[in-house]
Amino acid sequence: MSNFVVLPIIIPLLAGIVTAFFNKKVVISRILTKILIIVNLLFTSFLCFYVLQNGNVILETGSWPAPYGIVFVADPLSVLLVLTTNVLAVACAFYAPHSLSIKKEKHYFYSFFFFLISGVSGAFLTGDLFNLFVFFEVLLMASYGLIVLGGNKVQLRESLKYVLFNLFSSVIFVTTVAFLYSVVGTVNMAQIAERVQEVEQQGILTTIGIVLFFVFATKAALFPLYYWMPHSYIVPNPVISALFGALLTKVGLYSILRVFSLIFVFEINLTHYFFIWIAGLSMIFGVIGALSTNNIKLIIAYNVIPAIGFMIMGIGIFNQDAMSGTVYYLIHDMIIKTALFLIVGVITYVAGTSDLRKMSGLIHQYPALAWILFISAFVLSGIPPFSGFIGKLLLFRGSVANEEIVIVIIALITSLLILYSILKIFIRGFWGEKQESIEKKSTKGLIAPIVFLLAFSVALGVGAEFVYPVVDSVSAYLLQPEIYIDSVLKE
């Protein structure tokens, strides 16, 4: 069973190579992509079920025992995130042929798509800090190929900014890993967690932890390191924006969650209190950005930032309810953000613009699209009984238990403003007089993937009595790092 752990990495990697040979034969590429991504989803579903039923599955590559060899760890957190990644990847694979031009499909979109999924899955499953850096680079290289696909002037300008910021953070990342290795003598995350408790240089370790947080916060687009993200995420095709918004920032958030629940847990009063302040500022500035623009793509891109703030809030509070809220909200946000990026892609296509001031009355021609957006607004903002509400309820409960009332107030106000920012698209874009100058366009193949994602998101809320026990067990597991350490090092 242990060899199965790397299949969520290997299957998309091989799929990317196979589709590269058929880049000129678009129909074959599309069929292969749909078949292979469904196969990967079915396999990750089985792996997730197995891990949740039987506990961690560890692969020691080359039969080298940890910590001497590279290990991959399928634990409850990582498999849930890999499964969620593949759910949204299926939707994007079916949406892409109806959104991309033939030219973009021929320029290796499907290969880059699979390489991105492989890199993200690897980042979730690796048990090695240096290997985490390697998989960051794999997913970033794939994202570089995706973000320049099309090659218009604005796209190239934003791509340059995106690449430079990520290269800068990657240099700091690998340098910090080297410093950490010099202190603890290993890059295996389980052994690092074991050794940091014994090292007397707690001040140096705290500094290394803060620098690592800076690296991951840059990739997660937290305040004040988010300014590279919104415009970079809206210049590619909507399906690429959806992949970026759902996955790239979440890998940064996952890294913070993993490292600061497993390794750097010896200065919680310092680091985690700092996280709460960063969370509040991310919520405030993110939602201000969403309210300040009339570009519907930018509204969704800016709403990525307060969502990351909600998750960091849970890590900062660091009790079981708050950690459950972070995990629940992370899964919820990956799915609903994908749906929203795809929705605004359809709106931009049918309206011929992404400027709210130049569209109105779309509900007369596209009623299904209007009500999908309306429901999505309620899901995102956390209106009961949707999944966003469950995650936020847990976060608020954990915050109140720790008497962190200020962050709860900020989060409540932010939630209302998030709802308004999305409903603004609904009110201005869909209400009003029908614009006779806009011809009705076919949305065939574009709506079904969005409904698929929205159904998952609604199920997370309505079916909370089934999902919550799983998430709660994950949060309990995260608060007991010795379980992870013992399973990897077999102590």
Image (spheres, helix red, strand yellow):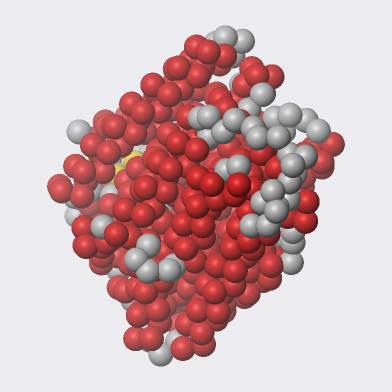
**Image quadrant containing the C terminus:** bottom left
Looking at this view, name the residue that lies furthest to the right.
153
Q: Position of residue 83 (x, y in %)?
A: 35, 42
**Residue 370 in view, yes or no:** yes
Q: Tell me if residue 304 comes above or below residue 392 in the rendering.
A: above
Q: Is residue 141 visible?
A: no
Which residue shows up at 64% across the image and 57% down it? 431
Residue at 36% x, 48% y is 456
Image vertical order of residue 438 relative to residue 14, above or below: below
Dividing the picture into quadrants, the one containing residue 3 is top left
Q: Position of residue 489 (x, y in %)?
A: 26, 51
Asked whether 490 or 149 is in front, the reply is: 149
Residue 453 image-quadrant placement:
top left
- Numbered-mark total: 0
Above or below — where is 231 with respect to 440?
Answer: below
Q: Is residue 305 left or right of residue 89?
A: right
Image location (x, y in percent) of residue 292? 74, 66
Q: What quarter of the picture does the N terminus occupy?
A: top left
At 57% from the left and 27% from the top, the residue drawn is 98
Q: Quadrant of residue 159?
A: top right
Of 307 and 423, nearer the camera is 423
Say whether residue 296 is left or right of residue 462: right
Between residues 126 and 301, which one lies in front from this camera angle?
301
Q: Where in the figure is residue 106, as x and y percent of width and height?
A: 64, 17
In the drawing, does residue 361 fall left or right of residue 392? right
